[in-house]
Amino acid sequence: MDPKKVADLISEDRLKIKAIYDLFRGQFFGFARRYQLDDSDLSDIYQEAFLALIKHSKNGKLEKVQCSMKTYLFQIGKHMIYDLFKYKGKMVPYDANLRIEREEEINITFDQSDALSTAQRQLRKYFKALDEKCRELLTLFYYRGLTLEEMADKAGLRNANVAKVQKHRCLEKLRNQM
Amino acid sequence: MDHTMLIEKYLQGSLSAKERSEFDILFGSDEEFAREVAFQENLREVVNAEKDPLRKMVGELESEFQENRPTSGTWKKLLVAASIFAVLGLAIFYNLNRPVSSSDLYENYFENYPNVVNPLERGNTANAKDTAFEAYETGRYQEAYDRFRDLLETEDQTYYQFYMANALLELGRAEEAILLLKEYSASEDKLTDRAGWYLAMAYLQLDDKKQAITELEKIVEQGAYNSSEAEQLLAELR
């Protein structure tokens, strides 16, 4: 894979990374049109795939890869598109499978820990739509790993019991949407 | 122990051995319990992901990409105009600060590639492609760049990349142009053989004489597009 582009991805240089992001963004949408997904799903998938690409470049996974960066990125995206269809319980459009790829198919061993799964991305949408109080409480619990007492203290709640009830309420909101 | 508590302790890694076996049994036998564990594990991943600075950056890149598209809103047009002036200003600033030779040579040799793929006829109703090329021909390069980029999403025509690169060179954004030109020259399109010359121009704009010479030598060697000019330019660079 083009070592210059890989080096650009690893660099902390935002402009260089942005140039690559923009370079493939339009082409990815062109490529993914055939799956007839809406733009918000595609944008979501492109971001996730690009994030995985950066992570793979940082942990040295790209060095041995033979194909172009574009092919690699699109394969990750395609993997996620198929996953989305599976999640929604739908079939991949027949027509999309018939299209012959211009670039070679490659088999990517895709480490799920580098990206959020389809179910997680769905959950993320609902999480971001929660009110700020809920987001704060859930972050204190799941990210910081605080106990109910500590949560009550941080979030300015009366006691651990109130924190427990509030957390339960927030989880309930999320569950109802899934 | 109550299920909620059991899951909480599991997520915080504080189950005792006895609780652990209770958890395992429930997880294997109670579908609803297993689903709840999966739900909360997913939620933990999501909450953690929100704190990932790389993810935050990618999210910003996406919003910037979407904001840069041409729309009918006037304030957005103003923003685009302002950014063109900023880019032009920067380009001028950089050119003034560069050693005279490279930028002079660039000025003398660079001319953007003419629109040969979509001749414009006056008076016809314009489609998206015409509008893009019209912007290009009349020197509205930022707009042309944005429009070509949008076209690339819907049409499978790689030469848009080539024209995008030309627009970027006009805007003084050689680094981005280089990425596009390299991408384009790997494709087999009708203008592919022209990419080398513009790659050389891009390096010249960046004052990277070494790379410019390498590209020019390739052109001369292969007798590719503009090879006589490439020869002349090489002589001046050496």
Image (cartoon, coloured by chain):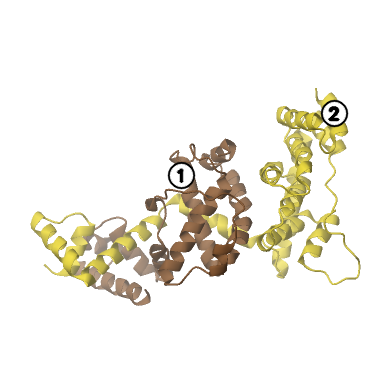
Quadrant of res A90: bottom left
Q: Residue furthest right?
A: B122
Q: Are the numbered discs 1 and 2 placed on the same chain, yes or no?
A: no
Q: How many marks?
A: 2
Q: Is residue A105 left or right of residue B132?
A: left
Amino acid tagged 2? Glu
Q: Say whether residue A66 is left or right of residue B219.
A: left
Q: Secondary structure at mark 1?
A: helix
Residue marked by disc 1: A56
Residue B231 is labelled as 2
Going by the numbered disc 1, the residue's amino acid type is His
Determine contact: label 1, label 2, CB under 8 Å: no
Specify the chain shown as yellow.
B
Report whether A26 appears left or right of A43. Answer: right
Between A72 and A6, the one lying in front of the other is A72
Q: Whole-percent x and y of residue A55?
A: 45, 46
Report which quarter residue B217 is drawn in. top right
| Residue name at image x 71 percent, y 43 percent | B185
Image coordinates of residue B131 in percent, x first then y, are: 80, 64
Provide residue A67's location: percent of width, then percent of height: 55, 43
Residue located 74% across and 39% down the image: B199
Disc 1 to disc 2, C-alpha distance: 42 Å
Q: Is residue B85 visible?
A: yes
The label number, if any, that marks residue A139 in the structure image: none
Q: Quadrant of the N terminus of chain B?
A: bottom left
Residue extending farthest left: B18
Residue under the image location 20 percent in, 66 percent down:
A160
Q: Look at the image and tell me in which quarter the C terminus of chain B lies.
A: top right
The percent coordinates of residue A177 (x first, y second) are: 37, 76
